[in-house]
Image (cartoon, grey):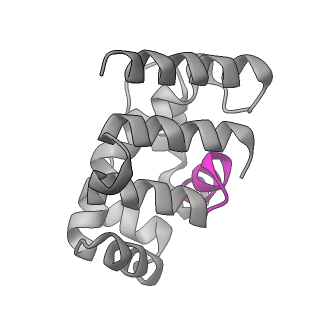
Amino acid sequence: MGLFDQVAGQVLGGLSGGGAGQSPLMQLVQAVLQQEGGLMGLVSRLQTGGLAEQVASWIGNGANLPVSGEQIRAALGSDLLASLAGQAGLSPQAASDGLADQLPGLIDKLSPGGHLEGNDQLVQQGLSMLGGLLGGR
């Protein structure tokens, strides 16, 4: 994964408190990002899995369209989702529902101005966001 994806992983760790006490859902989100080769890979997988309209809304500046756990399961594949869910200690249903709840906001936050590219400015914004999250703890 690239530097931007490492920053995204750190942001996720910061949101959940990081370390051994990390929530199973945050572990799952990180595992999905890693499995798909980072944020760009995950976005591509979701788009080709039938969620192009929803993903476009998450990246864009408007309201985020909702997605169901069933749609996430169909886009990622039941086998992959079951495997990653098991590693995180979640049922496949809880995993798909949790991803459906978290991914729209996560992708929205990691695509300021509607851009996913891991350029230096975006990396700096991610580092600033991470610093702000951890500075308040």
Stretch of the chain drawn in magenta: 36-47
Does 13 lie within the magenta span? no
- Counting the numbered discs, the total is 0
**How far across and down, in percent of the image, does residue 102 sit?**
33, 44
From the top left corner, tell me how far across and down residue 110 is, in percent.
54, 30
**Residue at horizontal 68 percent and vertical 22 percent from the top:** 122
Please determine whether, in this image, residue 91 is positioned above or below residue 12: below
Question: Residue 45 or 136: which is nearer the viewer?
Answer: 136
Q: Which of 83 and 6 is in front in this view?
A: 6
Q: Is residue 135 left or right of residue 117?
A: left
Quadrant of the frame with the C terminus: top left
Q: Is residue 66 visible?
A: no
- The residue lying at 67 percent from left, 32 percent from top is 116
Position of residue 134 measured from the top left corner of the image (x, y, whole percent)? 40, 24
Residue drawn at (59%, 23%), measured in percent from left and top?
A: 127
Tell which residue pokes out farthest to the right in this image: 119
Q: Which image quarter: residue 62? A: top left
Work out whether 35 lies above or below 53: below
Give residue 121's position: percent from left, percent from top: 73, 16
Tell me, yes or no, if residue 63 can be seen here: yes
Residue 41, magenta (yes or no) = yes
55 vs 128, nearest the viewer: 128
Q: Residue 96 occupies which quadrant of the picture? A: bottom left
State left or right for residue 79 relative to residue 41.
left
- Residue drawn at (36%, 80%) of the image: 82
Q: Name the dominant secondary structure of the magenta segment.
A: helix
Picture layout, residue 119 above or below residue 51: above
Front-lying residue, 90 or 22:
22
